[in-house]
Image: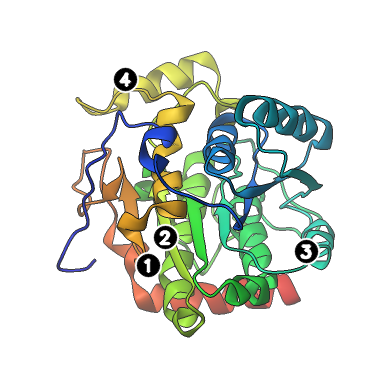
Amino acid sequence: MSDSRISTPFGAESTADEVIAGVDLAGRRAIVTGGASGIGVATARALARAGAEVTLAVRDVEAGRRTAAEITAGTGNRRLLVAPLDLADRASVADFVGGWHGPLHILVNNAGVMAPPLRRTADGWELQFATNHLGHFALATGLHGALAAAGDARIVSVSSVGHTVAGVDFDDINFERRPYEPFVAYGQSKTANVLFAVEASRRWAADGITANALNPGRIMSTGLTRHLDQEVALASARSTSAGVSEKSPEQGAATSVLLAASPLVAGVGGRYFEDCEEAEPHRPGVRRGVAAYALDPEAAVRLWDVSTTMINS
Protein backbone atom coordinates (compact mmCIF):
# COMPACT_ATOMS: atom_id res chain seq x y z
CA MET A 1 0.00 0.00 0.00
CA SER A 2 1.34 3.38 -0.93
CA ASP A 3 1.61 6.15 1.63
CA SER A 4 -0.66 8.32 -0.53
CA ARG A 5 -4.02 6.65 -1.04
CA ILE A 6 -5.72 7.58 -4.31
CA SER A 7 -9.23 9.00 -4.26
CA THR A 8 -11.41 10.36 -7.03
CA PRO A 9 -14.56 12.48 -7.27
CA PHE A 10 -16.54 9.26 -7.79
CA GLY A 11 -17.92 6.80 -5.27
CA ALA A 12 -20.06 3.75 -4.58
CA GLU A 13 -23.09 5.06 -6.45
CA SER A 14 -21.22 6.26 -9.53
CA THR A 15 -21.87 4.46 -12.81
CA ALA A 16 -19.49 3.39 -15.53
CA ASP A 17 -20.80 6.07 -17.85
CA GLU A 18 -20.25 8.77 -15.24
CA VAL A 19 -16.60 7.89 -14.61
CA ILE A 20 -15.77 7.75 -18.31
CA ALA A 21 -17.66 10.91 -19.32
CA GLY A 22 -15.45 13.11 -21.50
CA VAL A 23 -12.85 10.39 -22.12
CA ASP A 24 -12.02 9.73 -25.79
CA LEU A 25 -10.91 6.16 -26.52
CA ALA A 26 -10.97 6.44 -30.31
CA GLY A 27 -8.15 4.40 -31.79
CA ARG A 28 -7.73 2.30 -28.65
CA ARG A 29 -8.43 -1.42 -28.42
CA ALA A 30 -9.87 -3.26 -25.45
CA ILE A 31 -10.64 -6.84 -24.44
CA VAL A 32 -13.28 -7.63 -21.81
CA THR A 33 -13.42 -11.24 -20.68
CA GLY A 34 -16.90 -12.36 -19.75
CA GLY A 35 -18.21 -9.37 -21.67
CA ALA A 36 -21.60 -10.92 -22.44
CA SER A 37 -23.08 -10.81 -18.95
CA GLY A 38 -23.27 -8.83 -15.72
CA ILE A 39 -20.76 -6.08 -15.13
CA GLY A 40 -18.84 -7.27 -18.20
CA VAL A 41 -21.60 -5.92 -20.43
CA ALA A 42 -21.68 -2.61 -18.56
CA THR A 43 -17.89 -2.35 -18.80
CA ALA A 44 -17.83 -3.12 -22.52
CA ARG A 45 -20.69 -0.71 -23.19
CA ALA A 46 -18.96 2.18 -21.43
CA LEU A 47 -15.68 1.58 -23.26
CA ALA A 48 -17.51 1.34 -26.58
CA ARG A 49 -19.47 4.53 -25.89
CA ALA A 50 -16.12 6.30 -25.39
CA GLY A 51 -15.04 5.12 -28.86
CA ALA A 52 -12.87 2.07 -28.18
CA GLU A 53 -12.77 -1.06 -30.28
CA VAL A 54 -13.99 -3.71 -27.84
CA THR A 55 -13.54 -7.45 -28.14
CA LEU A 56 -15.89 -9.54 -26.03
CA ALA A 57 -13.93 -12.65 -25.03
CA VAL A 58 -16.64 -15.12 -24.08
CA ARG A 59 -17.47 -18.80 -23.71
CA ASP A 60 -20.90 -18.39 -25.32
CA VAL A 61 -20.21 -16.82 -28.70
CA GLU A 62 -23.89 -16.48 -29.62
CA ALA A 63 -24.58 -14.59 -26.39
CA GLY A 64 -21.53 -12.46 -27.17
CA ARG A 65 -22.86 -11.61 -30.60
CA ARG A 66 -26.24 -10.61 -29.19
CA THR A 67 -24.52 -8.41 -26.60
CA ALA A 68 -22.28 -6.84 -29.26
CA ALA A 69 -25.30 -6.03 -31.41
CA GLU A 70 -27.09 -4.48 -28.44
CA ILE A 71 -24.06 -2.36 -27.56
CA THR A 72 -23.69 -1.21 -31.16
CA ALA A 73 -27.38 -0.30 -31.30
CA GLY A 74 -27.09 1.66 -28.07
CA THR A 75 -23.79 3.44 -28.72
CA GLY A 76 -23.46 3.63 -32.49
CA ASN A 77 -20.01 2.03 -32.20
CA ARG A 78 -19.67 -0.77 -34.75
CA ARG A 79 -16.21 -1.78 -33.56
CA LEU A 80 -17.55 -4.56 -31.35
CA LEU A 81 -15.91 -7.92 -31.89
CA VAL A 82 -16.59 -11.34 -30.38
CA ALA A 83 -14.08 -14.14 -29.85
CA PRO A 84 -14.37 -17.50 -28.06
CA LEU A 85 -12.46 -17.87 -24.80
CA ASP A 86 -12.71 -20.57 -22.16
CA LEU A 87 -10.35 -19.51 -19.39
CA ALA A 88 -10.30 -23.00 -17.88
CA ASP A 89 -9.00 -24.51 -21.13
CA ARG A 90 -5.33 -23.86 -21.94
CA ALA A 91 -5.87 -24.57 -25.63
CA SER A 92 -8.70 -22.03 -25.81
CA VAL A 93 -6.53 -19.33 -24.22
CA ALA A 94 -3.69 -20.16 -26.61
CA ASP A 95 -6.05 -19.95 -29.60
CA PHE A 96 -7.30 -16.55 -28.48
CA VAL A 97 -3.78 -15.23 -27.99
CA GLY A 98 -2.68 -16.63 -31.34
CA GLY A 99 -5.56 -14.88 -33.06
CA TRP A 100 -4.75 -11.44 -31.67
CA HIS A 101 -2.80 -9.05 -33.89
CA GLY A 102 -1.65 -5.51 -33.21
CA PRO A 103 -1.49 -3.48 -30.00
CA LEU A 104 -3.79 -3.91 -27.02
CA HIS A 105 -4.46 -0.87 -24.86
CA ILE A 106 -6.92 -2.23 -22.29
CA LEU A 107 -7.31 -5.75 -20.90
CA VAL A 108 -10.18 -6.20 -18.45
CA ASN A 109 -9.94 -9.57 -16.70
CA ASN A 110 -13.59 -9.60 -15.75
CA ALA A 111 -14.87 -13.18 -16.18
CA GLY A 112 -15.11 -15.41 -13.17
CA VAL A 113 -16.80 -18.23 -11.33
CA MET A 114 -17.84 -18.14 -7.67
CA ALA A 115 -18.26 -20.94 -5.14
CA PRO A 116 -19.22 -23.93 -7.29
CA PRO A 117 -19.01 -27.49 -5.99
CA LEU A 118 -15.52 -28.97 -6.36
CA ARG A 119 -14.63 -29.24 -10.01
CA ARG A 120 -11.30 -29.74 -11.71
CA THR A 121 -10.08 -28.83 -15.17
CA ALA A 122 -8.55 -31.31 -17.59
CA ASP A 123 -5.20 -30.39 -16.02
CA GLY A 124 -6.43 -31.28 -12.54
CA TRP A 125 -6.59 -27.67 -11.39
CA GLU A 126 -9.31 -26.50 -9.03
CA LEU A 127 -11.81 -24.68 -11.25
CA GLN A 128 -11.96 -21.31 -9.48
CA PHE A 129 -8.20 -20.87 -9.34
CA ALA A 130 -7.92 -22.07 -12.94
CA THR A 131 -10.61 -19.74 -14.27
CA ASN A 132 -10.29 -16.66 -12.12
CA HIS A 133 -6.50 -16.57 -11.99
CA LEU A 134 -4.57 -19.01 -14.18
CA GLY A 135 -6.62 -18.44 -17.33
CA HIS A 136 -6.28 -14.68 -17.00
CA PHE A 137 -2.59 -15.05 -16.15
CA ALA A 138 -2.02 -17.07 -19.33
CA LEU A 139 -4.05 -14.55 -21.31
CA ALA A 140 -2.14 -11.52 -20.01
CA THR A 141 1.30 -13.08 -20.35
CA GLY A 142 0.41 -14.36 -23.80
CA LEU A 143 -0.67 -10.86 -24.84
CA HIS A 144 2.32 -9.14 -23.22
CA GLY A 145 3.80 -8.17 -26.58
CA ALA A 146 0.52 -6.58 -27.67
CA LEU A 147 0.21 -4.71 -24.37
CA ALA A 148 3.81 -3.49 -24.61
CA ALA A 149 3.20 -2.33 -28.18
CA ALA A 150 0.48 0.01 -26.93
CA GLY A 151 3.02 1.95 -24.87
CA ASP A 152 0.63 2.78 -22.04
CA ALA A 153 -1.54 -0.30 -21.65
CA ARG A 154 -3.72 -0.97 -18.63
CA ILE A 155 -4.71 -4.32 -17.15
CA VAL A 156 -7.74 -4.42 -14.87
CA SER A 157 -8.48 -7.52 -12.79
CA VAL A 158 -11.86 -7.88 -11.13
CA SER A 159 -11.18 -9.27 -7.67
CA SER A 160 -13.61 -9.26 -4.76
CA VAL A 161 -13.98 -8.48 -1.07
CA GLY A 162 -14.03 -12.28 -0.93
CA HIS A 163 -10.24 -12.16 -1.15
CA THR A 164 -10.24 -11.33 2.57
CA VAL A 165 -11.43 -14.89 3.27
CA ALA A 166 -8.19 -16.54 2.19
CA GLY A 167 -4.70 -15.97 0.89
CA VAL A 168 -3.00 -18.31 -1.56
CA ASP A 169 -2.11 -21.67 -0.01
CA PHE A 170 1.05 -22.41 -1.97
CA ASP A 171 1.30 -25.85 -0.38
CA ASP A 172 -2.11 -26.96 -1.61
CA ILE A 173 -3.47 -24.62 -4.26
CA ASN A 174 -5.70 -27.27 -5.83
CA PHE A 175 -7.24 -28.67 -2.63
CA GLU A 176 -5.63 -32.05 -3.05
CA ARG A 177 -4.98 -32.50 0.69
CA ARG A 178 -7.21 -30.05 2.53
CA PRO A 179 -11.03 -30.23 2.47
CA TYR A 180 -12.57 -28.22 -0.33
CA GLU A 181 -14.44 -25.15 0.84
CA PRO A 182 -16.05 -23.20 -2.03
CA PHE A 183 -15.60 -19.73 -0.54
CA VAL A 184 -12.04 -20.42 0.62
CA ALA A 185 -11.21 -21.48 -2.93
CA TYR A 186 -12.95 -18.36 -4.24
CA GLY A 187 -11.05 -16.16 -1.79
CA GLN A 188 -7.75 -17.73 -2.82
CA SER A 189 -8.44 -17.05 -6.50
CA LYS A 190 -9.45 -13.45 -5.81
CA THR A 191 -6.31 -12.85 -3.73
CA ALA A 192 -4.37 -14.18 -6.71
CA ASN A 193 -5.99 -11.49 -8.87
CA VAL A 194 -4.56 -8.79 -6.62
CA LEU A 195 -1.11 -10.39 -6.38
CA PHE A 196 -1.03 -10.61 -10.17
CA ALA A 197 -1.61 -6.85 -10.41
CA VAL A 198 1.20 -6.20 -7.93
CA GLU A 199 3.78 -8.25 -9.84
CA ALA A 200 2.63 -7.38 -13.36
CA SER A 201 3.01 -3.67 -12.60
CA ARG A 202 6.49 -4.22 -11.21
CA ARG A 203 7.67 -6.64 -13.88
CA TRP A 204 6.24 -4.76 -16.87
CA ALA A 205 6.78 -1.16 -15.74
CA ALA A 206 9.45 -0.57 -18.40
CA ASP A 207 6.84 -1.48 -21.04
CA GLY A 208 4.48 1.21 -19.79
CA ILE A 209 2.01 -1.42 -18.60
CA THR A 210 0.07 -0.84 -15.38
CA ALA A 211 -2.15 -3.38 -13.65
CA ASN A 212 -4.65 -2.93 -10.85
CA ALA A 213 -7.31 -5.02 -9.15
CA LEU A 214 -10.67 -4.06 -7.74
CA ASN A 215 -13.71 -5.03 -5.74
CA PRO A 216 -16.81 -4.22 -7.83
CA GLY A 217 -19.13 -4.39 -4.82
CA ARG A 218 -22.11 -6.61 -4.13
CA ILE A 219 -24.03 -7.20 -7.35
CA MET A 220 -26.44 -10.10 -6.87
CA SER A 221 -28.17 -9.72 -10.24
CA THR A 222 -25.40 -11.35 -12.30
CA GLY A 223 -24.53 -14.86 -13.40
CA LEU A 224 -21.67 -14.98 -10.90
CA THR A 225 -24.14 -15.99 -8.18
CA ARG A 226 -25.62 -18.90 -10.13
CA HIS A 227 -24.01 -21.49 -7.84
CA LEU A 228 -25.51 -19.91 -4.72
CA ASP A 229 -28.88 -21.15 -3.54
CA GLN A 230 -31.33 -18.59 -2.19
CA GLU A 231 -30.53 -19.33 1.45
CA VAL A 232 -26.80 -18.83 0.90
CA ALA A 233 -27.42 -15.64 -1.07
CA LEU A 234 -29.58 -14.23 1.72
CA ALA A 235 -26.99 -15.16 4.33
CA SER A 236 -24.35 -13.39 2.26
CA ALA A 237 -26.53 -10.32 2.06
CA ARG A 238 -27.13 -10.32 5.83
CA SER A 239 -23.40 -10.59 6.51
CA THR A 240 -22.64 -7.49 4.49
CA SER A 241 -21.66 -4.66 6.79
CA ALA A 242 -23.77 -1.57 7.29
CA GLY A 243 -23.39 0.98 4.54
CA VAL A 244 -22.42 -1.55 1.85
CA SER A 245 -25.51 -1.95 -0.29
CA GLU A 246 -26.22 -3.87 -3.44
CA LYS A 247 -25.13 -2.22 -6.68
CA SER A 248 -26.48 -2.27 -10.19
CA PRO A 249 -24.21 -3.76 -12.89
CA GLU A 250 -23.56 -0.21 -14.13
CA GLN A 251 -22.40 0.83 -10.65
CA GLY A 252 -20.43 -2.38 -10.26
CA ALA A 253 -18.59 -1.67 -13.50
CA ALA A 254 -17.64 1.87 -12.50
CA THR A 255 -14.37 0.99 -10.79
CA SER A 256 -13.36 -1.32 -13.66
CA VAL A 257 -13.94 1.47 -16.17
CA LEU A 258 -12.16 4.02 -13.99
CA LEU A 259 -9.05 1.84 -13.91
CA ALA A 260 -9.33 0.98 -17.60
CA ALA A 261 -9.70 4.44 -19.00
CA SER A 262 -9.77 7.40 -16.63
CA PRO A 263 -6.92 9.92 -16.74
CA LEU A 264 -7.34 10.21 -12.96
CA VAL A 265 -5.39 6.96 -12.49
CA ALA A 266 -2.94 7.20 -15.39
CA GLY A 267 0.36 5.59 -14.46
CA VAL A 268 -1.06 4.01 -11.31
CA GLY A 269 -0.34 0.31 -10.82
CA GLY A 270 -0.15 -2.53 -8.35
CA ARG A 271 -3.07 -1.35 -6.25
CA TYR A 272 -6.54 -2.49 -5.19
CA PHE A 273 -9.57 -0.23 -5.56
CA GLU A 274 -13.19 -0.24 -4.46
CA ASP A 275 -15.94 2.34 -4.91
CA CYS A 276 -13.70 4.24 -7.36
CA GLU A 277 -10.87 4.84 -4.90
CA GLU A 278 -7.89 2.98 -3.55
CA ALA A 279 -8.99 0.72 -0.73
CA GLU A 280 -7.94 1.13 2.86
CA PRO A 281 -6.38 -1.79 4.77
CA HIS A 282 -8.87 -4.49 5.65
CA ARG A 283 -10.18 -4.59 9.22
CA PRO A 284 -11.57 -7.86 10.62
CA GLY A 285 -15.35 -8.02 10.60
CA VAL A 286 -15.72 -5.36 7.91
CA ARG A 287 -16.46 -6.37 4.33
CA ARG A 288 -14.25 -3.72 2.85
CA GLY A 289 -10.58 -2.99 2.35
CA VAL A 290 -7.60 -4.94 1.11
CA ALA A 291 -5.80 -7.68 3.02
CA ALA A 292 -2.09 -7.14 3.56
CA TYR A 293 -1.27 -10.58 2.15
CA ALA A 294 -2.89 -9.63 -1.16
CA LEU A 295 -0.35 -6.82 -1.63
CA ASP A 296 2.69 -8.77 -0.41
CA PRO A 297 5.39 -8.35 -3.10
CA GLU A 298 7.16 -11.58 -2.12
CA ALA A 299 3.93 -13.57 -2.42
CA ALA A 300 3.29 -11.84 -5.76
CA VAL A 301 6.64 -13.02 -7.13
CA ARG A 302 6.07 -16.53 -5.80
CA LEU A 303 2.61 -16.69 -7.38
CA TRP A 304 3.98 -15.49 -10.71
CA ASP A 305 6.62 -18.22 -10.68
CA VAL A 306 4.17 -20.93 -9.63
CA SER A 307 1.62 -19.82 -12.21
CA THR A 308 4.24 -19.79 -14.97
CA THR A 309 5.23 -23.35 -14.09
CA MET A 310 1.61 -24.50 -14.01
CA ILE A 311 0.58 -23.10 -17.38
CA ASN A 312 3.76 -24.31 -19.07
CA SER A 313 3.85 -27.82 -17.59
Give left or right: position of 97 versus 39.
right
Q: Secondary structure at mark 3?
A: loop
Q: Amino acid at mark 2?
A: Asn
Q: How much space separates mark 1 and mark 2, taking CA atoms?
A: 5 Å
For residue 238, the mark is: 4
Task: Tell me which numbered mark, 1 or 2, is placed earlier along the sequence.
Answer: 2
To which residue does mark 3 refer?
100
Q: Position of residue 160 (x, y in %)?
A: 42, 44
Q: Amino acid at mark 1?
A: Gly
Residue at x 76%, y 49% (from the top left corner): 86
Q: Position of residue 106 (x, y in %)?
A: 56, 58
Report if the CB atoms under discs 3 and 4 are less than 8 Å apart. no
Location of residue 3 by image quarter: bottom left
Give left or right: position of 243 versus 91.
left
Frontmost residue, 252 versus 126:
252
To which residue does mark 2 refer?
212
Give left or right: position of 63 versus 14.
right
Q: Nearer the viewer, mark 4 or mark 2?
A: 2
Q: Position of residue 302 (x, y in %)?
A: 48, 78
To which residue does mark 1 refer?
270
Q: How much space separates mark 1 and mark 3, taking CA atoms?
A: 25 Å
Frontmost residue, 182 versus 244:
244
**Considering only vertical position in the picture, is 106 above or below 144?**
above
Q: Nearer the viewer, mark 1 or mark 4?
A: 1
Q: Amino acid at mark 3?
A: Trp
Q: Residues within 10 Å of mark 3 (few under 14, many from 20)?
A: few
Q: Secondary structure at mark 1?
A: loop
Q: Secondary structure at mark 4?
A: helix
